[in-house]
Image: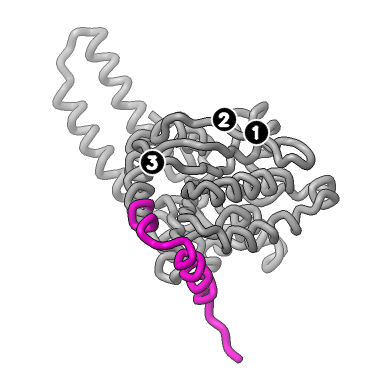
Amino acid sequence: MNDTGLDFEKPIVELEQKIVELRSFSQGRKIDLQDEIVKFEEKLEKLKREIFDNLSPWQKVQIARHPKRPYTLDYISLIMTDFIELHGDQLFRDDPAIICGLAKIDGEKIMLIGHQKGKDTKENLYRSFGSAHPEGYRKAMRLMELAGRFKVPVVTFIDTPGAYPGIDAEERGQAEAIAHNLQEMAALAVPVIVVVIGEGGSGGALGIGIGDRICMLENAYYSVISPEGCAAILWRNRIHAPEAAAALKITADDLLKLGIIDEIIPEPLGGAHRDYKATAEALKASLKKNLAALKKIPGEELVLKRYEKFRKMGMWEE
């Protein structure tokens, strides 16, 4: 049961609690209430579908930010084996906001790069809420280049509100680090699969987001700016974030139609935070399928196709 329900989830949470109470009462008093429980469960399933089949873009943003949503380390433990974390950019320090390392998916070797948020306040402070410093992007690039040298496919998991915006990050070359990653990822002669697993915020997301396949979990979002930031600029008030979320076209459905992403990975009814295992299984199936397809393409052709892919994005007039 979800005990940190979002506003639109409250009717679901209340009904779930009612079912728990009925089961407890039934067991404690030795009374058969199975018929009543089944009716409530059917009502719960119907309510879930009514709510989650009609989510607004802003509601999907809220699900993408859910504090109980699975993060990179959760997926590593659920779908990968033999994970060896690799640290440091060999220039300044290790950045815990980005996890990097070698792993296997059903025996297939990969280099895994992913943003990592914290499960509580202490860990979030340690990991900068998933907002990487320049050394995080340089660490990621160092290990992607290592993967390229040994012909190991690269998989990246995006989940960040944006790159760390502090003065110290700017002093160490935040913009340059991200720009360098865009250039070098475009030229990697190995398969690169990018998955937006939660928040995909601005350059912080794009810094590990250049790939042959761009996938998104169903309730993730991917945007040049947060809805709150957009609302603050256009309306001078963050209260208009829901309107901004709709206008920005940041959901997986919108981005698939616009040709920005290649695939939507389904989530369990109610979001990834309600069933880690089912979400991980869908993610694993997508990764295996795309890895198998991309491995058949020669490295030089991968680079050319990747370049053409990103050149085709967007519309413009001369």
Disc 3 element: strand
Residue 226 visible? The answer is: no
Distance from disc 1 to disc 3, alpha carbons, whole Å, reads: 31 Å
247 vs 157: above or below: below
Q: How is the image coloured?
A: one colour
Quadrant in the rendering for residue 180:
bottom right
Q: Which of pointers 2 and 3 lies earlier in the amino acid sequence?
A: 3
Percent of width and height locating residue 23: 26, 18
Amino acid type, label 3: Glu
Residue matched to label 3 = 108
Residue depicted at x 32% and y 20%: 21
Q: Is residue 93 above or below residue 53?
A: above
User: Does the residue at mark 2 contact the one at mark 1 (Cβ under 8 Å)?
Assistant: yes
Determine the CA span between mark 2 and mark 1.
7 Å
Task: Give above or below for 317 relative to 29.
Answer: below
Q: Tags 1 and 3 in contact by the CB under 8 Å rule?
A: no
| Mark 1, residue position | 124
* Magenta span main SS: helix
User: Which percent across, then down, holds residue 229?
Assistant: 67, 58
Name which residue lies at 21% across and 26% down: 37
Magenta region, residue range: 291-318
Image quadrant occupied by the N terminus: top left
Badge 1 or badge 3: first in the primary sequence: 3
| Residue hosting label 2 | 119
CB within 8 Å, label 2 to label 3: no
Labels 2 and 1: the sequence-earlier one: 2
Q: Amino acid at mark 2?
A: Lys
Residue at (51% x, 42% y) in the render: 112
Considering every residue shown, the one lying at the far bottom of the view is 318
Left or right: residue 300 versus residue 208 is left
